Image: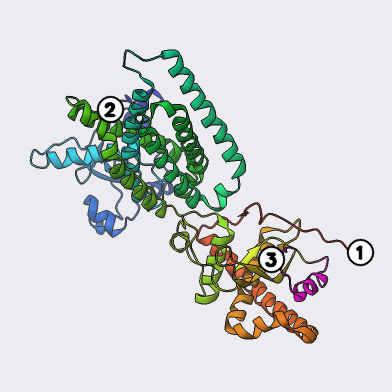
Amino acid sequence: MQSAFYTASNSHQFPLPWKILETQLTAQRPFPKRLKTCFKASTFTNSLRTSIGYEPEESLGKEPGPATPGHLPVVIRRSGRVSRYFWDGSCLQLVGVDGGAASFSFNFEDGFRKLYRICSLAVRDFFIPKQVSGNYMDYVKWKFLHRVFSSALQVLATQAMFRAIGIGYSRSLPAAAALNWLLKEGLGRLSRCIYTASLASAFDTNLKRVRFSTSVLFSLSLGVELLTPAFPQYFLVLASLANMAKQISLACYLVTGSAVHRSFAIADNLGEVSAKAQIQTVCFDNLGLLLAALLNMLFKNSQRLQTALPFFVYPIFSVIDLFAIYQGLKHVHLQTLTKDRLEILLNTWIELGYVPAPAEVSKEEGIDFLRSKDRGLWPIRIGYLDPKNQIPELSMMTMRSTSGEDYYFISMEIFYTRIRRSRRQGILICVREGASTTDIVMGLLQACYIRKSHLMNKYRWENLFDAGDELESALKEWSKLIEECKRRAQGDMCLLNKQMLNLGWAMKNILLSSQEQIRYSFVDD
């Protein structure tokens, strides 16, 4: 019986076994009637029935016998192609539907369209993962521009350094050139280690800003490398500085790559997304190498033009490269929670009554390359009270009222801006050791409610810092506000968590900076 079901692996023909066993089955008793119901054709939707030319609904209730030729109610979708099983009376065939690639018929008139569709599907399957978020294609388009022009600039910069150390000239000193190159590489890798160690947590909390900042640094390093032929006596200094900047940028690119890829992997297919990203990088970089080679071929007959070529194309290619990186980062919607991201989410919840999606929060968050975004009135900070700053007595009274059951406390603080040195008021959340993610979310939600109350009664709460003899009444007012906002935050937590999980937010942890990770311990004297 097993040999009757055998089919060749390279054929779409599937000979069925009932003709071989026809004489054997006639001698046996018929199948029970309940088994016949197992082979009834299932009802398809109207859209599917229309697209594949399905028979009218009157034939759905009938049980077609194995000898009746016609389409079978099974459709296969693979790599963007749609195929359907067809029984011709003796063999089972897999026939393409709507011009699919599995069709055995070929029409000359629409042959070009079919060929284009097959090629486009093959290219898409080669470069693009099967299950990614909808913004992935926009990201890849900008990545294409970034990698092509960045790769071309790197080729031109490397050529410039070769000319600076004398490679290709009779007066070159190979030993000195090799020593300078090794020193340059060693200093660059050392700076890479120091950079990654000093900014470990910033890669999570400020991913977009750090990545774009290092991209600007990388572009500047290529400009420094292009200057080495003009100052060959300072080759080691210039090349070392440029390589240090390049190594720092490379470290950031590698560290943040997994987080960027994870934001697109909607089916936990991080490995597939990372593999396709490597394929894209290699192919796009090769196109950049080809672009640089074509530029060199155009000016190969003029040594003067070939020397001036990098200085002419550098500003153009750098602008295109950085613009593509900036636009590409806009299409990266991170689902992880940071303090700033969570604050945007909670403000939307309080003001508009819904939880925003990662794409909406990403648009509001931006990149903030120059850190010029205004924090607004009554900014919220997670950390500890700095004794160097002026701390009102109200904050000290708040700390004294903290109990062992609290996993955070909220206080007021006074700080001074860095540029104008103006006096500002803010809200501080101090988190206790052992606090969970839910405690931090509820504390920040409570602080957002407090800020809303402060903004509605701006002048009233500013006068509390100078309460003087009325400190006791001010403390009662503050305690009343704290309890009221805490009750509102507790009432919102259940629905808030549910909506955040439904929208794909990662609720397991909140990524905090090194200063925001400082915790306090409660001492009961």
Q: Residue 98, relative to residue 352: is it above or below?
A: above
The one nearer the camera, 347 or 290, is: 290
Q: Residue 395, relative to residue 500: is it above or below?
A: below
In space, the residues marked 2 and 3 are separated at their CA atoms by: 68 Å
Please give the label number shown on residue 525: 1
The one nearer the camera, 228 or 445, is: 228
Relative to 516, 356 lies left or right = left
Relative to 338, 275 lies left or right = left
In space, the residues marked 1 and 3 are separated at their CA atoms by: 23 Å
Disc 1 residue type? Asp
Disc 2 + disc 1, Cβ < 8 Å: no
- Quadrant housing the C terminus: bottom right
Disc 2 residue type? Ser
Relative to 476, 139 lies left or right = left
Question: What SS does tag 2 mark?
Answer: loop
Which span of residues is magenta-colored? 388-405
Q: Would you say residue 91 is visible in this rendering?
A: no
- Quadrant housing the N terminus: top left
- The residue wearing badge 3 is 429
Give the label, 2 or 1, closer to the camera.
Answer: 1
Mark before the other along the chain sequence, 1 or 3: 3
Residue at image point 70% right, 82% down: 464
Residue at image point 51% right, 57% down: 504
As for residue 390 lying within the magenta part, the answer is yes
Q: Residues within 10 Å of mark 1 (few under 14, many from 20)?
A: few
Q: Residue furthest left?
A: 109
- The residue wearing badge 2 is 11
